[in-house]
Image: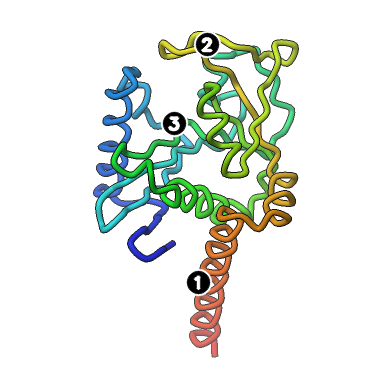
Amino acid sequence: MDLGDIEVKLIRTEDGFSHAREVLEGVAKEREWPIDKVVKSHPKSLYWLAYKNCSPAGVIKVVLGDPNKFPIKENEAWPELIISSESCIEVAIAAVKPEYRGIRDVFLAMFAKMYADLSEIGITEIYAILDRKIQLLYKRVGLSFEEIPESAGGGRRQYWGEETFPAVLNLPKTLVLLEKKQNRLWQLVCVANSQKDHIVNRRRKAMRKRLA
């Protein structure tokens, strides 16, 4: 997805993975997180990388597949967390370089592109490990992650040296609210979906020509 000088890609190349690692390592050092765990790839990891003026600006790492193998349920985190839905993903990390954090569209464009790319597989819930500050930042842009209580295997704990908690976002409910508010994130979701539809239609036309 291209927003003038911001472009977001689902990365598939070695250069792309190298750029994603650069962003992740920088954030890990800044927050004093364990670098090896931050950059660790799971068997079903996907990365959306944002570029601003062709420079890596941010990355979202998502884990799909069996919820029981999500990072959020690893032994050192919340192994007893109850995840009842099979139609879910975990945002293992969302990171933006310090120099681009004042540009909200960097993160919003990554989320919108991620949603557009995953919409066809019927994702209904997004899990994440958050602290209170990040939860509030998400809420301001229209993403109201709900803290999972201890009764469901959640609760606040020290994780990577910070007090954090597992949280979940109901995606269908969130999209209804975003559409009502018509905020910036909703606009970017519409742009991402429109661009995806254009690409799909172009591929269909090309296939029809080959079969004609």
Is residue 92 positioned above or below 7 on the image? above
Quadrant hosting residue 85: top right
In whole angstroms, how far apart are the C-alphas of marks 2 and 3?
Answer: 15 Å
Quadrant hosting residue 139: top right
Q: Residue at x 53, y 13 (%)?
A: 77
Which mark, residue 42?
A: 3
In whole angstroms, how far apart are the C-alphas of marks 1 and 2?
Answer: 41 Å
Is residue 39 positioned above or below 185 on the image? above
Do the residues under discs 3 and 1 have CB atoms within 8 angstroms?
no
User: Residue 140 at what x, y percent from top left?
Assistant: 58, 40
Q: Residue at x 37, y 26 (%)?
A: 38
User: Residue 36 at what x, y percent from top left?
Assistant: 31, 22
Amino acid identity at mark 2: Asn
Amino acid identity at mark 3: His
Q: Give the structural element (helix, strand or loop) at label 3.
A: loop
Chain-order first, disc 2 or disc 3: 3
The residue singled out by tag 1 in the image is 199
Of residues 119 and 133, the one drawn nearer to the viewer in this rendering: 133
The residue singled out by tag 2 in the image is 75
Q: How many marks?
A: 3
Amino acid identity at mark 1: Ile
